[in-house]
Amino acid sequence: MAQSMRSDTPPSIAAAIDIGSNSIKMTIGRADGNGGVEQLDWASEVVRLGQGLDQTGLLDEERIENAIETLGRFAAQARQRGATQVVAVATEATRAAANGASFLDRVRVETGIDVRVIDGQAEAALTFRGLTTEVDLTGLIVVSDIGGGSTELIVARDATVQAARSLPLGSGRLTDRFIASDPPRLEELADCETAAAVAVQAVQALDLPPGSETRLIVVGGTGEFMVRLIPDEAHIDLAAVRLVLAKLATLSAAEVADEISIPEARARVLPAGVAIVAAIAARVDPARIEISRSGIRVGLLLEALSGGVIPAGDSETRAGSGGKQARTDSSVASSPRDASARSFRETMSALIAERWQTVLAAIPIALAGTDIEGVHDVRVASRRLRAAMDVAAPAFPGKWYKALHGTAKEITGALGEVRDRDVLLEALYADRRAAPLAEHPGIGRLIDRVERERVAARSEMESYLRQLLAGSLRDEVERRFAAVEAPPNGTGISTGSAL
């Protein structure tokens, strides 16, 4: 049995674990001598501990087993890195589940980790303390920490907290409730954003003075992963967030996972998390949006390395209490805030323009023929373009759109014959290398035949692509998908044909 790693004196190296509704995360660090933390190592595992909690009121037994196995590995990793203390907190999923206490009893017995269940106020306090060492907190700021089961909102001015609220609103929770498709349908994303907007609208602390130059700081995985889908990380606004939502409506979870290097299970709940960001940004109307990885685990490390506990009122919450908290704001307003920066048409126009640019930039590489992946890259880019244009078609009823939509499909088809033979030739060459010498002549004849077919197919492809580049396509794309003025009272993601 593992021994609990607790000490009466501050450790030189400590590990902090956050048991969330989506993921279990650990950061190992030591004091840096300047009031901050030097992070030595970290680990993350997507367990989805809170999946199905709203329907059953219980943590799923299989997910409990996965969580305990993960925590055991994390404890061993912490010891190997020299940590003499492991501090851990559990948040929304564990505190709301009827079997949360029994889960934590097993964690203590089987891993030696004594987990503290905290409420939303303590979660917000730890998050904010973690930010103080990493982020400029001058001026008026709103901090949003979006988890799988809850979202913590903090309003602060010049590094002093003015209000903190915890909402039963998370990426996993909204995914379970609204998203059944992969990729998510626009209606599903709209439902997520509407539900988030209703909850956020009720937070009176977000009634900020107009023209206050508020900064919105998005903390945690949702922000970190969202920004990987934004071309210009230095300029993030509501329009950029809505563009990410539009992209996510055209990519499967597997494609998102591959594109931004995250587990597929985490990619599955990302769209709902981004919808929450959009709802908060629409409510706050920030001058700019910033992303920070710092948060609760850095706060926990500061707490452990200083030998103290962050006071947050009555912050301890019994696991299995149904999520009752001393100070949370989960009331529902009658309607969401009816304002946003971009209409669906504008958002999709920007996305389609971006994907056309990707296709047009990849075509010369395919034509050069020096990179075997050049053709593949154009096909992938054109498929993603087609997916975006499929989704946006109701908003662009003109004949010009149908023509450009058809061209996008033609590009995919024009490269298909070449790509298929590239893949076949790669397999044939591999077969010949592995085959007995007696079989080489037969495989060689097949290779010669496919090579001739590829030459013919490539000739047709090159002719088509060169005509495409020499024509008016680029000018037509730039003219048709330039930014358009938002109609009055735009409401973000919409699927109505009135667009």
Image (spheres, grey):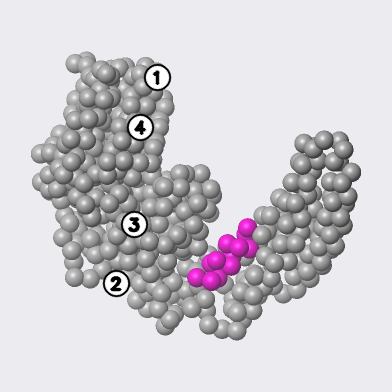
- Residue position for label 3: 175
Q: Is residue 227 left or right of residue 454?
A: left
- Residue position for label 4: 70
- Residue position for label 2: 338
Q: Is residue 132 above or below residue 389?
A: above
For the record, the magenta segment spans 380-391
Q: Is residue 425 above or below residue 114?
A: below
Give the Cα distance between marks 3 and 4: 23 Å
Q: Position of residue 76 (x, y in %)?
A: 36, 22
* For marks 2 and 3 on the same chain, the one whose residue lies earlier in the sequence: 3
Q: Nearer the viewer, residue 53 or 9?
A: 53
* For marks 2 and 1 on the same chain, the one whose residue lies earlier in the sequence: 1
Give the Cα distance between marks 2 and 3: 23 Å
Does the segment drawn in magenta span residue 389?
A: yes
The reply to whether residue 303 is visible in this rendering is no
Identity of the residue drawn at 16% across and 47% down:
323
Residue type beneath disc 3: Thr
Q: Residue 378's image quarter?
A: bottom right
Query: In what quadrant of the picture does the N terminus appear?
Result: top left
Identity of the residue drawn at 86% across and 55% down:
449
- Mainly helix, strand or loop, the magenta region? helix
Q: Position of residue 444 (x, y in %)?
A: 87, 46
Of helix, strand and loop, which one carries label 2? Answer: loop
Circles 4 and 1: CB atoms closer than 8 Å: no
